[in-house]
Image (cartoon, rainbow, N blue to C red):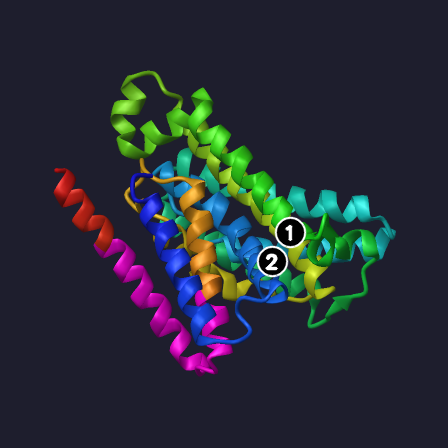
Amino acid sequence: MNALPARIGALLLLALALSLATEGFATATNLLNVLRQASLLFLVASGLTLVIIGGGLDLSVAANLTLSACTAALAFKATGSVAAAVATALGCGLAVGLLNGLLVAVVRVPAFLATYGTLWIASGAAYWLMAGRVVYGFPPALRGLGTGFVLGVPTPVWIMLAVAVAGGAFLFLSAAGREVFFTGANEEAARLSGIPVRRRRILVYGLSGLMCGVAALVYLGRVNAAEAGLGDPLLLPAVAAVLIGGTSLFGGAGGLAGTLVGALILTTVTNGLNLLDVGAAWHPFVTGTIILAALGADALLARRGA
C-alpha cells in the first residue's frame, strides 16, 4: 500500500499526457468509457487479488466468467426470468471458485495446476453448453448492468466502487481479512498461530469465483450476447492489473485500491493507444513494459526500505 500514491501519480501523469497528445481523451464521453472498461477488468481482478494476497493463484477467472455468462444466458432463455439469470451466474461462479478452493486447500493440489485444470474444465463446459450458438437479446433490466447509468455515471462503475469498498473493508477491517494476509505471508506460521488456513483459502477462492459471476452479468449486459470464449481475453489483463497495482505474487501484501489503479492504468493506456492510432500488435508490448516497470519500482522501494 505504501507505493499506492506513486501509482496514482503515474495514472494522473498518464492522463495528462494523453490529454495533451490527443483531442478526444479528455472528453466526458471518453473518460466515462475508460471507467466503464476498467470496471469489468477490476471486477475480474478483484477476486484474483484476494487469492494472491492469501498465497494462491487463480488462472480460471476468465473461463469462470465465460461459463457463468453462458449458463446465465441459457437460464434466462429457458425461464424468461432475470432473477434466474442473476442467480445462475452468481451460483456458477461461486461453485467454480469453491471447487478451486477445495482442490488447493483440501486436496493440496498446487494452485497453478488446480486452477489451470479448472480453466480447461470451465472453458470446455461452456463450449459444450453453447454448441456453437450465440445467445443474445436480453431485457433492459439485465442490459442495464453493463450499459446503464445512475446519476450520470455508468452502472458498472458504481458496482466497481461498491466492490472496492466492501473488499477493502473485508481485507483491512475484519479478522478474516487480516488472517488472509497472515496466511499469504507465512502459511506455516499462520497455522501454528491458530488461523484456519484451509477455510481462509476456500473463502478467497469462493469470493474470486463470486466476482467472476458478477463480472459475467456486467459483461452480458454490455455485449447483449453470450458465447463460448467470451471472457478469454481478460485473463492476462486481470493478472496485469493485480501486478501493476502492487499485490505481491508471493502473497501477504497488496490491496484492492492498488488493483483498481492498475485496472485504470491499463484501460487508460489501451484507450490512449487507440486514440493515437497505434497498431494492436504494440499493445501487449506496452502492457508488458508497464508490468516490468511497476515490478522494478516495487523492488527498488523494497531495497530502500530494507
State the image coordinates of residue 88 (x, y, percent, origin top left): 71, 46
- In this rendering, the answer to whether 289 lies above or below 104 is below
Marks 1/2: CA distance?
6 Å
Q: Name which residue lies at 69% across and 69% down.
A: 131
Asked whether the beta carbons under mark 1 and mark 2 sit within 8 Å of each other, the answer is yes
**Residue 204 vs residue 247, the one in the foreground:** 247
Residue lying at the far right of the rendered structure: 80
State the image coordinates of residue 127 (x, y, percent, origin top left): 63, 65
Instruction: For residue 70, say whether it is visible.
Output: no
- Provide the residue span drawn in magenta: 269-296
**Residue 170 vs residue 226, the one in the foreground:** 170
Within the magenta stretch, is there residue 39?
A: no
Q: Residues within 10 Å of mark 1 (few under 14, many from 20)?
A: many
Q: Earlier in the sequence, mark 1 or mark 2?
A: 2
State the image coordinates of residue 254 (x, y, percent, origin top left): 35, 40
**Marking on residue 298:** none
Inspect the image, locate mark 2, and give the three-letter code of the amino acid beneath it.
Answer: Arg
**Residue 208 vs residue 154, the one in the foreground:** 154
Inspect the image, locate mark 1, and give the three-letter code of the amino acid beneath it.
Answer: Pro
User: In the picture provided, is 174 more to the left or to the right than 2?
Assistant: right
Q: Name which residue lies at 18% across and 43% down.
A: 302
In this figure, which residue is indicated by the disc labeled 2? Answer: 36
In this figure, which residue is indicated by the disc labeled 1? Answer: 156
Q: What quarter of the picture does the N terminus occupy?
A: top left
Within the magenta stretch, is there residue 279?
A: yes
